[in-house]
Image: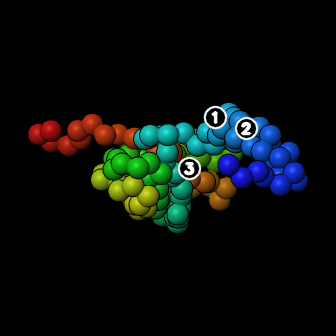
């Protein structure tokens, strides 16, 4: 069996240490995002409060999971920390990595100039609608 040059011998002793460090780095790295249906991003695309008594909200839902999901979307309109109105929508069959767009008309008590819309989404993979 051929001998390694003397300058490479110290490197061979380091290989197990480097492998151990690499394995520990993978095992101990915290997950930065949740896994499964919780991997969803919801954003308000537009919040139109021009018509008295209503907010026309357009929102997007991004499925960050590896499987298709439906999402329950909760919308809120508030000003100065006080809720003015809210609503719920469903977005069905969002493919993995896909973005779905939805719209909702929310009835509000008032349309102050500082009103803002917020949105959140959770997986809703159960049945919805009539006859389901």
Badge 3: residue crowd in 10 Å (few <14, some 14–19, many ≥20):
some
Q: Position of residue 16 (x, y in %)?
A: 73, 38
Badge 1: residue crowd in 10 Å (few <14, some 14–19, many ≥20):
few
Residue pointed to by mark 3: 118
Q: Position of residue 103 (x, y in %)?
A: 40, 60
**Nearest the eye: 123 or 36:** 36
Return the mark for residue 27.
1
**Nearest the eye: 66 or 78:** 66
Residue at the image position 68 percent from the left and 49 percent from the top = 1
Residue 44 at least partly seen = yes
Badge 2: residue crowd in 10 Å (few <14, some 14–19, many ≥20):
few
Mark 1 or 3: the one toward you: 1
- Give SS at disc 1: helix
Mark 2 or mark 3: whose residue is earlier in sequence: 2
Q: Is residue 60 above or below residue 130?
A: below
Residue 88 at least partly seen = no
Residue pointed to by mark 2: 16
Mark 2–mark 3 CB contact (< 8 Å)? no
Mark 2 or 3: the one toward you: 2
Mark 1 or mark 2: whose residue is earlier in sequence: 2
Residue at the image position 43 percent from the left and 41 percent from the top = 37
């Amino acid at each position: 069996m051929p001998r390694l040059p003397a300058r490479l011998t110290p490197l061979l002793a380091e290989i197990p240490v480097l492998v151990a460090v690499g394995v520990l780095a993978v095992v101990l790295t915290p997950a930065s995002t949740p896994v499964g249906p919780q991997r969803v991003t919801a954003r308000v695309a537009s919040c139109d409060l021009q018509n008295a008594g209503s907010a026309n909200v357009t929102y997007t839902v991004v499925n960050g999971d590896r499987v298709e999901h439906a999402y329950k979307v909760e919308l809120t309109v508030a000003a100065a920390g006080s809720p003015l109105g809210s609503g719920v929508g469903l977005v069905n069959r969002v493919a993995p990595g896909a973005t779905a767009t939805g719209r909702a008309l929310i009835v509000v008590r008032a349309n102050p100039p500082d009103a803002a819309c917020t949105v959140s989404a959770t997986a809703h993979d159960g049945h919805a609608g009539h006859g389901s």
